[in-house]
Amino acid sequence: MQHPKEVADLKRFDIPPVLTGFIDGRPVPESASAEIVTCIAPSDETELLSLHEADANEVDAAVSAARRAFDSGPWPRMSVDERNRILRQIRDKIIEHADELAYLESVNVGLPIRNVKTVHIPRAARNFEFFAEVASQATGEVYTQTRPYLSYVTREPVGVGGLIGPWNYPLGLGTMKIASCIAFGNTCVIKPSEYAPLSLTRAMELIHETDIPPGVINLVNGRGHVTGEALTGHPGVDVVSFTGGTVTARAIMRSASAHLKPVAFELGGKSANIVTASADLERALDGSLSTIYLDNGQQCLAGSRILVERSIADEFIQKFVERSRKVRIGDPLSPDTELGPLCYEAHLEKVLSYVGIAQQEGAELLTGGRRSDAFERGFYIEPTAVMAPSNSARVCQEEIFGPFAAFLVFDDLDEAIEIANDSNFGLVAYIWSEDLPTVMRASQGIRAGTIWVNTPTTRDLRAPFGGYKDSGIGRDSARDCMEFFTEAKTTTIPTDTFPITDFGKAQ
Ligand code: TXE
């Protein structure tokens, strides 16, 4: 069912035909010589907008603005309370413009508006409030054990952050990077994904209606191998924070290594979702559908390998398939839509290519596996599930990043844990069981950064989030972000006089 009124109401917001960057508090003027990157609307394949790509000179201007704002501007020198007042102004701006930002995010990425409105926009606003709170509650360390000295540790902002955002949650994850970077007194340059630049670029205008000083947050738009590489390799950038794929992460690490820049990487996953016979099966079914189909399955934390205990497997998988066939595919702007189009065409092709890959390796297609024929245009795909031949199949080892579940059957928990760990990734895992020892064994045995027990995706910003193995380097959390975006400084002072070696005093 479509809701023409709600959809029309959202379409009152403008989409600018051309997007540029935002440097030193001002939009970058359009340039006749810029490379043009065209963004396509995933729901109908029309041209959404043109990006004027930032070249190395523009990136240099953005980094120089961030450098000036850090080296001599007011931001790092402000009281924490004053900075927090401005971070809260940014939060309020996002809330005030929530409908517009939700519309832009949904139109550009294809995310169903329902979840964008209720989860992602509130999260974007919360990011600024949360890191304002973290910065104001930060404590130091004092060591008095080595007498007669007192050593205290302070944390100072690290400098300029080079932030590279992904396309799946441009605003939620982009603002997380910005907020966690600037809350501690740093300045930054962010590059959104070339596929999804709209919401974050608009947010820059709104952010600059607050008292944020110019140059604290700069944005450059463009493709990864041009704009992104110029940013991560720039000598004026002190640290790099990246969310995206593992292949790109390796390239970024190489370019950051020239200046020994610390990197924080939040990468992909192939997370095991273990459904045991001791689970509340109705809730496990709801949770399993949700972790793989929510936000079109374009989530690093998707439960994309569903491991089901043999005694319940047939019934569980049959119910999963029945429910998959009833998922409402549609216009991402319609409040009823559960599954929108994938973000861009090459990504749709990548996701669909795994149907053939799976079948060649002996997998059975359980449902979906093709473009939805309900739409003449748009990157729509049916919810897809396969029964994998074994965990070594590519559908169980590679991140597909779409509404595509691979099922495996296990006989006991040890086997399930072994399968879960037999992966190059280690981002999250899900365990469904009402039996405490089962839950505890799974939680202790699985090598992943987060274990969700009887619950689909739930983020607590206070707790570390990030991956083992190829799923990343570092964590996001109050403490981890503070440590990444600050330098520790130890100051040692004697509390009494003490003898100092007297070189050259001998008569
Ligand atoms: O992402 P990329 P892609 C995974 C998912 C997806 C795969 C590839 O499996 O199918 O990655 O997606 C910028 N220097 N995730 O290719 O390339 C790029 O412009 C600097 C998981 O679209 O990782 C964009 O801003 N920057 C994921 C950002 O990197 C570069 C979210 C991410 O793009 C660059 C997205 C370079 N050389 C994809 N090359 C998650 N962890 O949630 C590209 N970029």
Image (tube, rainbow, N blue to C red):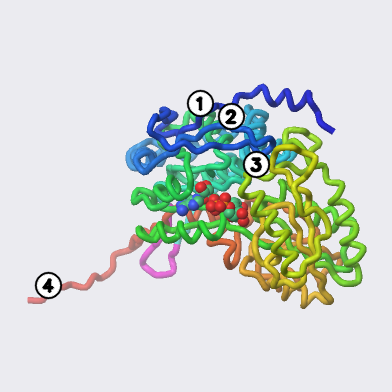
Label 2: element kind: helix
Q: Which residue is mark 3?
A: 123
Inspect this view and state whether residue 458 appears.
no
- Residue type at mark 1 is Glu
Residue at mark 1 to residue at mark 4: CA–CA distance: 64 Å
Label 1: element kind: loop
The picture places residue 195, in percent across and down from the top left corner, at: 57, 42
Q: Nearer the viewer, residue 256 or 487?
A: 256
Residue at mark 3 to residue at mark 1: CA–CA distance: 20 Å
- Residue type at mark 3 is Arg
Residues drawn in magenta: 143-155
Is label 3 in contact with label 1 (beta carbons under 8 Å)? no
Q: Which residue is mark 1?
A: 209
Residue in the picture at 72% in, 76% down: 418
Label disc, if present, on residue 93 of the rendered structure:
2
Q: What secondary structure do most residues of the magenta stretch adopt?
A: strand
Q: Nearer the viewer, residue 317 or 412?
A: 317
